[in-house]
């Protein structure tokens, strides 16, 4: 029987490095994906995910299983992501005031390194990729806290109580936040929804 | 009711709440449309593929973990340094000893020395008194002087 996250973390606290490797293996992909969808830069997402794991490791001696491990993990990740977004926005503002306009090279970094496309039809693949880009763009346009709430709700499938703890808000405030976020997505993605309904 | 639409879609409402929502949806076309649109949005979000962390990710995390300083608790550190343990014990003993001593100063030290001398003198008083009596005892001065060897030779001459 697989050990729970809390059991693994308590073993890490007791000095078992192998348990930390198991936690790393268990959460590396969800964490990198969450951070990638938050910051839209693969390299930055991996750096932040590394930082999350290092912070967990450093805090091992003081770990007390008072909440779910995922709440703690994604709380660290969310805070790091929100700080990173703010820092990046600040840097971009400084650059845009000083530097001449250049082609945005980040787009190349942000292209997903997905599993190989199975569809042999290039045109269909391009359409599919354009639609995915629309979805990504709609998520990007959400305010950071709404974006984090949607990602934790949709992709991590955390319950409302857990997400509200991660985002440091009440459960009712979270429900309201999520509703506004899905409302925005509904409007932004309405053309795509209509297109799907036709086909 | 609106904010509960998501809970309804997620299937997170209690049985009673679920029934109430279904009853509401049956009579509210706007909310029914909203539920369908939210479900469509949720399906679209499912289309975003996951990315895999790069091969270097684990290596980099493990390297950073290995570079972390090893944490030792206070006692194990002390155990590894017996000289410091001995020095600390001696310092502790000295502190306790100094802490239990009476308040001390130069004047009190002098007065203490005087007091001690007086006590000694008081203790030796009977002996000293006997000495004074014997030294000034006139009857003893009237006794003939003891005969020495030099005196006998003088008589012979």
Image (spheres, coloured by chain):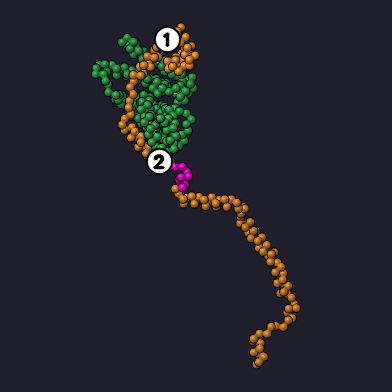
Chain colours: A green, B orange
Q: Is residue B48 magenta?
A: no
Query: Residue shown at 73%/78% (left/top)?
Result: B140
Residue B35 placement (x, y as % from top left): 41, 12
Badge 1: residue crowd in 10 Å (few <14, some 14–19, many ≥20) = some
Residue range in magenta is B72-79
Is residue B74 magenta-colored? Answer: yes
**Local secondary structure at mark 1:** helix
Main SS of the magenta segment? helix
Residue A153 in view here? yes
Q: Looking at the image, is mark 1 or mark 2 earlier in the sequence? A: 1
Using the image, name the chain to which the residue with label 2 belongs: B
Task: Residue B54: give x, y in percent of width and height.
Answer: 31, 30
**Image height check: is B63 above or below A132?**
below
What residue sits 41% from the left and 41% below the top?
B70
Q: Residue at x 35, y 13 (%)?
A: A193
Would residue A96 be visible to someone looking at this image?
Answer: no
Q: Nearer the viewer, residue B142 or B49?
A: B49
Query: In whole angstroms, how far apart are the C-alphas of marks 1 and 2?
Result: 58 Å
Element marked by disc 2: loop
Numbered mark located on residue B32 in the image: 1
Instruction: Decide which of A13, B6 is in the foreground and name it.
Output: A13
* The furthest residue to the front: A1
Which is in the foreground here, disc 1 or disc 2?
Answer: 1
Task: Locate residue B138 relative to residue B68 in the image: left or right.
Answer: right
Q: Residue furthest bottom?
A: B157
In the current view of this chain or complex, which residue is farthest to the right? B139
Above or below, B76 against A71 in this view is: below
Q: Badges 1 and 2: C-beta atoms under 8 Å apart?
A: no
């Amino acid at each position: 029987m697989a050990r729970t996250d809390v059991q693994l973390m308590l073993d890490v606290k007791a000095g078992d490095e192998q348990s930390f490797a198991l936690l790393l293996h268990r959460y590396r992909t969800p964490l990198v994906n969450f951070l990638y969808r938050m910051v839209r830069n693969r390299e930055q997402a991996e750096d932040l995910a590394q930082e999350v794991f290092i912070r967990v490791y450093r805090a091992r001696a003081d770990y007390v299983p008072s909440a779910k491990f995922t709440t703690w993990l994604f709380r660290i990740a969310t805070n790091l992501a929100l700080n990173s977004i703010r820092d990046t926005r600040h840097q971009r503002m400084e650059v845009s005031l000083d530097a001449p306009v250049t082609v945005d090279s980040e787009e190349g970094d942000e292209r997903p390194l997905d599993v190989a496309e199975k569809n042999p039809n290039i045109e269909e693949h391009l359409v599919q990729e354009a639609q995915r880009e629309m979805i990504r763009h709609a998520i990007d346009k959400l305010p950071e806290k709404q974006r984090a709430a949607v990602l934790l709700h949709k992709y991590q499938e955390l319950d409302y109580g857990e997400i509200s703890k991660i985002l440091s808000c009440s459960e009712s405030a979270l429900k309201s936040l999520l509703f506004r976020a899905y409302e925005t997505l509904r409007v932004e993605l309405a053309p795509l929804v209509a297109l799907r309904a036709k086909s | 009711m609106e904010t509960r639409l998501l809970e309804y879609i997620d299937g997170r409402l209690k049985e009673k709440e679920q029934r109430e929502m279904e009853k509401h949806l049956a009579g509210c076309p706007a909310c029914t449309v909203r539920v369908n649109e939210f479900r469509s949005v949720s399906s679209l979000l499912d289309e975003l593929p996951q990315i895999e962390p790069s091969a270097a990710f684990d290596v980099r995390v493990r390297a950073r973990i290995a570079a972390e300083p090893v944490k030792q608790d206070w006692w194990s550190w002390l155990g590894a340094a017996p000289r410091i343990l001995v020095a600390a014990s001696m310092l502790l003993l000295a502190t306790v000893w100094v802490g239990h001593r009476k308040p001390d100063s130069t004047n009190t030290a002098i007065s203490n020395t005087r007091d001690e001398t007086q006590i000694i003198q008081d203790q030796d008083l009977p002996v000293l008194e006997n000495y004074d009596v014997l030294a000034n005892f006139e009857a003893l001065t009237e006794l003939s002087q003891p005969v020495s060897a030099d005196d006998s030779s003088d008589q012979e001459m």
